Image (cartoon, rainbow, N blue to C red):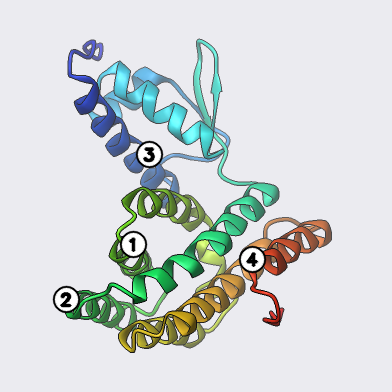
């Protein structure tokens, strides 16, 4: 059955397109949508129960993130991220999340502390690198970003993380003991609980650098140039005098 034309308001259409974009990302992550395969807008609309307009808008969002390539009059081809795309996304994270964690420490509440602790407990209970682990991981980071009060920043970082999470399988547990990742998160949480912004910033930076190293290192067979570019951005993000270990 053809998907009906969209007649919703601009605000409703934007919200719906965000939902569809998230659903398509989840489907790519789970393997329901295969990388390299071309999907028509009609097929995606039927799959996700959406009309043409929000599907087109969702695909444009995902094309901006490098996850799909729009092919005129044909649909969208699922791409995932290449090595350079992973470097760019990791670089944005290391530039944005550590100072955001420092800012969050100044305004966090006991309720925020409890919410972070709850997500961390889920990560410990599901420490197998599976979907529930990564879902709790995403929520934990999102809580920190939102605690700082800059919701635009929180939304942008969330989209970065969701895109990178398609390749998150490289960090836990195959190439890094899950205990290392858990300790990284605990260091951030404890610094925030003490309201020590500088320590929270440093702990977040260590965590992102460690994760980025793994993602970039396994992004392609010939990754020397990519690693050099990634480490250049890490040095740019680090305050003067702070030594980053690779």
> Left of 29 or right of it: where is 15?
left
Check disc 4 and report the residue beneath it: 237
- Which quarter of the image is occupied by the C terminus? bottom right
| Tag shown at residue 111 | 2
Question: Which numbered disc flags the more N-terminal residue, 1 or 2?
Answer: 2
Specify few, some or many for label 2: CA neighbours under 10 Å numbering under 14, 14-19, or 20 or more. Answer: few
The reply to whether dot 4 and dot 2 touch (C-beta < 8 Å) is no
Give the labeled residue for mark 3. Answer: 24
Mark 3 or mark 4, which is nearer the start of the sequence? 3
Q: What element carries label 4?
A: helix
Q: How crowded is mark 1: few (under 14 residues within 10 Å), some or many (20 or more)?
A: some
Sequence order check, earlier mark of 4 and 2: 2
Numbered disc in front, either 2 or 3: 2
Secondary structure of the residue carrying tag 1 is helix
User: Which residue carries the number 1 mark?
Assistant: 142
Disc 4 from disc 3: Cα separation: 32 Å
Which label's residue is closer to the chain start, 2 or 3?
3
Q: Give me the C-alpha separation between circle 2 and circle 3.
A: 32 Å
The quarter of the picture where the N terminus appears is: top left
- Can you see residue 15? yes
Rendered location of residue 130, percent (x, y): 38, 68
């Amino acid at each position: 059955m053809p998907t009906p034309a969209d007649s919703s308001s601009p605000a409703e259409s934007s919200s719906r397109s965000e939902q569809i974009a998230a659903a398509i990302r989840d489907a790519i992550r789970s393997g329901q949508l295969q990388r390299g395969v071309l999907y028509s807008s009609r097929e995606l609309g039927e799959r996700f129960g959406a009309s043409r307009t929000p599907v087109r808008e969702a695909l444009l969002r995902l094309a901006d993130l490098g996850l799909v390539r729009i092919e005129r009059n044909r649909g969208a081809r699922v791409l995932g991220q290449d090595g350079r795309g992973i470097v760019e996304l990791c670089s944005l994270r290391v530039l944005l999340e550590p100072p955001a964690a420092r800012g969050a420490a100044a305004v966090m509440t006991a309720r925020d502390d409890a919410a972070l602790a709850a997500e961390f407990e889920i990560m410990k209970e599901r420490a197998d690198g599976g979907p529930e682990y990564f879902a709790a991981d995403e929520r934990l980071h999102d809580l920190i970003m939102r605690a700082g009060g800059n919701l635009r920043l929180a939304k942008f970082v969330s989209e970065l993380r969701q895109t990178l999470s398609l390749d998150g399988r490289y960090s836990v547990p195959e190439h890094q003991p899950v205990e290392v990742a858990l300790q990284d998160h605990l260091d951030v949480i404890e610094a925030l609980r003490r309201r020590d912004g500088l320590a929270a910033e440093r702990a977040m930076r260590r965590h992102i650098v460690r994760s980025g190293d793994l993602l970039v290192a396994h992004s392609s067979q010939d990754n020397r140039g990519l690693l050099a570019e990634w480490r250049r951005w890490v040095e740019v993000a680090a305050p003067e005098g702070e030594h980053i270990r690779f």
